[in-house]
Image (spheres, rainbow, N blue to C red):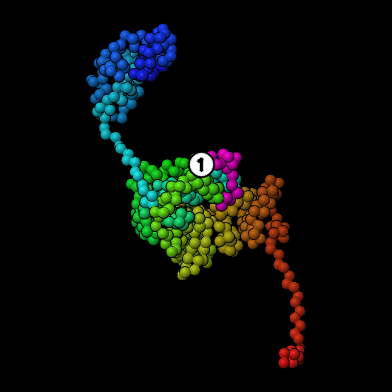
Amino acid sequence: MPGKKITDQQVRKYKEARRQTTQQIAAARMGISVRSARRIEQADGLPSQRGPRTWRTRADPLADVWEQELVPLLEREPGLQGRTLLEELQRRHGEVFGDGVLRTVQRRIRMWRAEHGHEKEVFFSQANPPGRLALSDFTVCDELRITVGGEHFAHRLYQFALAYSGWRHAELVCGGESFAALAQGLQNALWALGGVPEEHRTDSLSAAFNSLAEAETLTRRYEDLCRHYGLRPSRNNLGQSHENGAIESRQGSLKGALEQALLLRGHREFATTADYQRFVAEVVTRLNRRIQTRLSEERSQLAALPVRRTSEYEEIEARVTKFSTVSIRRVLYSVPSRLIGHRLQFRLYPERLEGWLGGVCVFESARGAVPAGKRRGKQLDYRHLLPALKRKPGAFARWALRDDMFPRAEYRQTWERLIETLPERQACKLMVGLLDLAARGACEVQLAQILGGLLQAGTLPDLEGLEARFAPRQTPLPAVTVSLPALSVYDGLYEVAA
């Protein structure tokens, strides 16, 4: 067949068939051309007994320029490509070298690099015995196009894997890479596995800190975490992801399995993040079913778990400003005004933030994130600022954080309508009253739906009517009449007892 060399066996079989039939029929039986059959009959020995061809079938088109012009360029810049060198020849010599010479240039460059090129990096595959190595890594999952509640859900996945058996554990990470996410994911994985390997490897964790001081603190806390479980901590060099290859390859297989499961599911919408986490757990469980034999072998080599878990949060100390806000990890949080001036100890979990004062938790909020392309994020709760806004409603008009405080788009659009239609003071009082009603009546969603309808109708909200509809009603206390028995009744009881 074209492009394939004729083997010794084909030659022997051809000669056997040639003794019994014609040249054309014997060649057809062996799958070779008649021309090749003629060459076989003219040759003396087998193809393996012939030396390499030493003659050229055509003149070398690069004979005059290879050593004089192209080799010096390659010695100076070995990364030059064949197309670049051919264009340079065409620039120097005009139409002497056509585009048909490209393959010749590329073959000559490949041969030159094999003989004179630089040494290349060698990858050494590692053999990991059971129970020795576990790895952790984070991966961005935007390509899965997950939506939660109708909105795009930007998230990461933390994955823990055993190098020998391939057993894995994955968890949802709503924020960025952090020590809290690593600590929680690692501990959940170890307790789900039921044992502890000898070594735990991560990448450089450079995405989890912003300064040298934070890097030193994170390194110390990571070493303390591994010491609690009896793990030997290790990490690969910065930028050398192939050193963590046993987990990097599994990140691709995990996202591939999730993509296939989503295609079977028919849609990518989830009602809550908890539903999506359960979906990820089901996919990981199916992947782990494939390695039960190797997992049983590896579990016998794992060390025992400690008596209890260790802390899986990160602590940061910060003071609440006079604006009733605090900045944690480049995210601005609103806090109750009663905490202004206090210096709190904040505990950062992957999904929430707690503020502690004197051993008492005085503040809790969902964990905020920094939006893509921005330097800072905001996690504001209008309920924290309502008492102050009710006393100073006029400050609402030019409040720096006003647009980030609206709980839903309908409230922001209502404010834009109010400030265009009403005097500023009246618009501020009405808007603050609507937010207060949403908080007091626990009707944020229902009130937003009504405001959306009023916006479409082009009318302004009636605060008194809405308060009559949503404000919490006081339940009248029932009238209870207590009649006390006469003391002589107790004398009768004593006589019966006697």
Number of numbered discs: 1
The residue at which mark 1 appears reads as 257
Kindly indicate the quadrant of the structure image that contains residue 110.
Answer: top left
Residue 340 lies, with reference to residue 173, above or below; the image says below
Q: Quadrant of the C terminus?
A: bottom right
- Report crowding for label 1: few under 14, some 14 to 19, many 20 or more residues within 10 A (C-alpha): some
Whether residue 295 appears in this view of the structure is yes
**Nearest to the observer: residue 88 or residue 336:** 88
Q: Residue at x 66, y 57 (%)?
A: 443
Q: Which residues are magenta?
A: 260-276
Where residue 23 appears, x then y in whole percent?
40, 8
Residue at 37% in and 59% down: 230
Residue 483 % position (x, y): 76, 83
Residue, x 43% and y 12% (percent of image)? Answer: 28
Camera-nearest residue between 79 and 316:
79
Q: In this rendering, is residue 423 above or below 391?
A: above
